[in-house]
Structure formats: structure tokens, C-alpha cells
Amino acid sequence: VIGGQFAHLGGQVPAGLARLNADGSADVSFNLNLGFGVDGIVYAAAVQGGTNIVIGGEFQNVGVARRTRIARLKSDGTVDNSFNSGTGADDSVFNISAQPDGSMYVGGLFNSFNGTHRLGITRLYADGTVDTTFLDTAYNQFAGLHRKYYDRQWSDPVNPDPNPDPRPYVYASQVLPDGNVVIGGGFKQVGGGQADASIRFDSD
């Protein structure tokens, strides 16, 4: 499965996402079921449960289905309607670590996910809803990456900070055998503690 920013592949109409056969040719049946394809860039694609495909990026629609920056497809290329994250991420999704039970860790440049405060990373249940037991603000007031980066460059466009820090983001993640999660990206602090070479999230 490949994603990106392309208009067509091998003469097929769908844009942004395709599945290839073992010889590198386009899987026509999968691509046809995508309809109009994806209307934006696909940055991440993960196979889940051996058949389903979860995609994330900078898009608003997959085929005729409204899916904001994240969607799950069935093995035939049709949108899986049992997974719906509502308004989705409010900015780009860069990484998806899909788990066998249907849940997933999602990383990116977002501030919130389906209206829930999440800075750069979140965990979703199998149906696409936010798992509020992970990074819940009752335990972690920052709910992800550190809040200090939200300075006047972003909060006050009239009087922006002349030397702003870049907005933090999560670009990669990996679930370890013990269930904890290692993340990487553009950040210097996670939650209330400084990041270092050994930083990782506990599974809670």
C-alpha cells in the first residue's frame, strides 16, 4: 500500500492512495473501490489486522466519505464505516501505529482530535473515538507535547513573537513489546518532563 500526493497510478483514476500487486502493478480492484480517491496528501498508511488499512495525512474526503485527516479502509478499498473519528485532527497526521485489537496511536501536528485536547499524539479506540485514559488531562495537563511552544506566534497573529519556537509535532512512533510507546519528532519536551534519549510514554 502506498500513499502520497499523486493524481493517478498506472492509468488508474484514484489519487493519493493505491495498492500494488507483488510485481509492482496497480491492484485495479482496490483502486476502483476508492472512487475519487483521497483529496489530499497521504502521509501515513498502516495495515491493521492483516486486512484493514488505516491512512492519515492532509485530506478531507476519501471517495465520497467525509474523513478528516484519518480513515480506515477495508481490504477491498472501501471505507470502513465502523471507524469514524468525527472531526478528526485539526492539523496534519504524520504517523499511525495500528494495533491488532483495532486501537492505534496517531501522531502529527495537531492541537486537538475530534474536539478533545491532544497535542501531537493521541490513542484511538477501534471505532475511531479518542481514548481519554491515555494522556488524560487529569494525569497530564499537557496531554502530549509541551504547551510552552504555544506562544504569540500562534496565539496572537497581530503581535507575533519575532523569534518563535516551532510548533512541536510527532513524526514517528513505535509500540514496544511491553506496551509502552516510543515517539520521535520535532519537540523538546513531553508533558511536564524534559525529553531525552530514553524518553517514552507508558501505556497509560
Image (cartoon, rainbow, N blue to C red):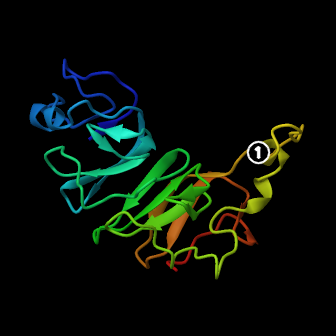
Q: Quick one: 71 or 46, which is closer to the camera?
A: 71
Position of residue 32 in the picture relative to residue 114 (left or right): left
Residue 80 image-quadrant placement: bottom left
Q: Residue furthest top?
A: 11
Residue at image point 82% right, 44% down: 156
Q: Secondary structure under badge 1?
A: helix
Position of residue 136 in the picture relative to residue 195 (left or right): left
Q: Is residue 87 above or below residue 49?
A: above
Residue 109, how many percent across, how many down? 59, 49
Position of residue 70 in the picture relative to residue 146 (left or right): left
Q: Amino acid at mark 1?
A: Trp
Residue at image point 18% right, 30% down: 24
Residue 181, how many percent across, how many down? 50, 69
Residue at image point 34% right, 36% down: 3
Residue at image point 69% right, 68% down: 142
Which residue in the structure is indicated by mark 1? 154
Q: Is residue 147 above or below residue 63?
A: below
Q: Residues within 10 Å of mark 1 (few under 14, many from 20)?
A: some
Residue 37 image-quadrant placement: top left
